Image (tube, coloured by chain):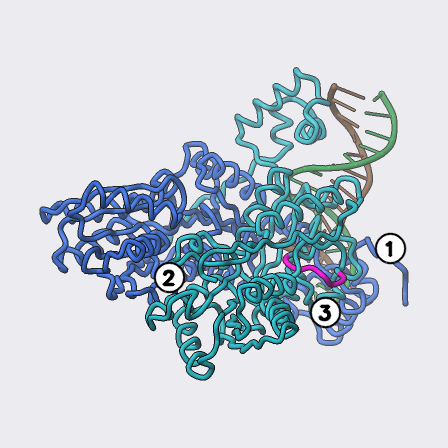
Chain colours: A cyan, B blue, C brown, D green
Amino acid sequence: MARRRRSSQRVTMGEVAQLADVSPSTVSLYMRRPDEVSPRRAEKIQSAIDRLGYLPNTMAGGLASSRSNVIGVIVPTITNSFFSATLETLERHLRSAGYQLLIGNTEFDESREEELIRSVMSWNPAGLVLTGFLHSRKSLSLLANSDTPIVEMWDYGRPGLDMVVGFSHHASGRLVAEHMLGRGYRRTAFISTNFQRDVRAGDRYLGFRETIEAAGGRVVLRQLSGRSDTAETGRLLGELIAENPGIEAICCSNDMVALGVMFECQRQGWPIPDRLAVAGFGNQDFTASTVPPMTSVEPPRQEIGRHVARLLMARLRDGTTPQEGNLDLGVELVVREST
Amino acid sequence: MARRRRSSQRVTMGEVAQLADVSPSTVSLYMRRPDEVSPRRAEKIQSAIDRLGYLPNTMAGGLASSRSNVIGVIVPTITNSFFSATLETLERHLRSAGYQLLIGNTEFDESREEELIRSVMSWNPAGLVLTGFLHSRKSLSLLANSDTPIVEMWDYGRPGLDMVVGFSHHASGRLVAEHMLGRGYRRTAFISTNFQRDVRAGDRYLGFRETIEAAGGRVVLRQLSGRSDTAETGRLLGELIAENPGIEAICCSNDMVALGVMFECQRQGWPIPDRLAVAGFGNQDFTASTVPPMTSVEPPRQEIGRHVARLLMARLRDGTTPQEGNLDLGVELVVREST
DNA sequence: GTGAAAGCGCTAACAT
DNA sequence: ATGTTAGCGCTTTCAC
């Protein structure tokens, strides 16, 4: 069934001006700096706005002022509690400062990032937030001749394009390794989402492996084919233990993988941590309630959002970058009974 | 090099035209309908674009054509696998058709929805996607005198503002109830995230309760104080069973709550489903791997995204709404060993 | 404090 | 097929 609608004309600033009996530029001034308009006219203008249901046209405003209130944010995926928590915090902080987030997700595809950067830059954004340091050559050249403030987030330890807010995934893997070594585990395994998809999981693995091996231990690696999948994790763990029965501890690239490991242990009747110690990454809500409670690493999801917003706004306000334009927020190991 | 520009200054269409030795409007035409430009000039224009690194200014284009490629999407939260999966699918489909998503999250606050609608509408969006049917009076009046296509998603069964894509949460609660009754459970409980936050969980509860009670059963309700929290869920379950030792089955408002219930059962040594049957909602990946595997309801997360995109694009293309502008996508009960 | 006028960078009639 | 011209709805000098 086809339905026709009147294409209702939007109210413009000029119409508001006419009704309020002032000039358009006075209305414009009122919208931007209300206290520079005399109370009498201010009131007339406001009532005209209310009466007509006026909504300013952001595009026209952005074009005229040749600056926008848009901040582009590009993440690998929003279906992931890591990035979505950061996004939510970032959104809250930036929106309250009058900015609008334009979110793009690459679905872990580098060429999509390029396309997204293109698309975001065409909005003339006030700022751009990227995930990690890995960008294609073309992406870099797109950003090279632009003076848009850029923050790379969720990683740390390599030179960034502009500002950086994150933490070292390598150090985070090391932290778990040191804990495992402290508990006396030497024969370990690392079960991970695919490094192709998630380079940062790869960094955590390296940090873990280097530390374990430096202490004379051993690390067997298993990668899932794609994203965290508890069923595949269970299968992988079964094979892993069949081939390496001496393994005492498993470090997982995230909590979901660790959950899959714990379920499989339960199914096999392997007591945790006596037969197998298990650690996750993410410290998601449920880690405190697993049986036994899961040792995990708490990444600064929300803090990242907060600081990205702070740096961006400092730059936008006065063109400066705070001293700490390169910020390592660190992680915390939450030790529970699974190790 | 023809001329020097300060790097902060963006290249305009006019500069491309100049370098390609054509008029701006030819460049404009080339950008929008390349095959209506002669191959010779097309090539010159393209090489000028490449050489200058030209990126069109979306705001200027939008203003001039008085239409935008923006689709506003407002969800309660993006930190929730339900909505984020829908968003990801929606984004993929709409972006490939040239649209840009403007995502806002209300954090379950009705007054924030109003503000977000305002903010989105100021972009003159081509379409608007809202979650559910509950909108404040002011929100409604904002939408009343606009001809923007609107889709309300993730719910079904009440009259919508325009188009609707979702499923009945009431029916989904009923489905679980019928399954439980079929298994012989009559003394049941419903543990839920807070209805204030999540009205749809409330609908599922109603559907569940009505069906159980119609069969002579009983339902005890427990609400969490906020979002799904496995620790709080454990506590609640403990109290619930202490006060109602006869309860045989628990229906949870989502899989995370059900996971909390299963952990608590494991901790207490209550065999599932013999002492207590447990069902979730969401059919998240991990439900297949819990011990025992969890019975859950599969909502059409991705399908919602797909169909919202489809309806929106049909309307935008030819102004029509397909036959099924009001779409119940239904749910599927996935029965596993936890019931 | 207020208004007139000149754009912002593009699109869309229309003319050629 | 290409160019000319007149806006889109707002912001921003700059007079008054």
Residue at the location (58% across, 50% down)? B67
Magenta segment, which residues? A154-159
Q: CA distance from mark 3 to mark 1?
A: 21 Å
Which residue bears the numbered disc 3? A138
Tag 2 and tag 1 share a subunit: yes
In front: label 3 or label 2? 2
Q: SS at mark 3?
A: helix
Residue found at the far bottom of this picture: A243
Label 1: chain letter: B
Where's residue A246, x and y in %? 47, 79
Is A220 placed left or right of A245 in the picture?
A: right
Indicate the amino acid at tag 1.
Arg
Secondary structure beneath label 1: loop
Given the image, what chain letter belongs to the residue carrying mark 2?
A: B
Three-letter amino acid code at the position of disc 2? Gln
Q: Which residue is mark 2?
A: B284
Front-most of residues B323 and A142: A142
Residue A213: say if magenta. Answer: no
Left or right: B17 as drawn, with respect to B185? right
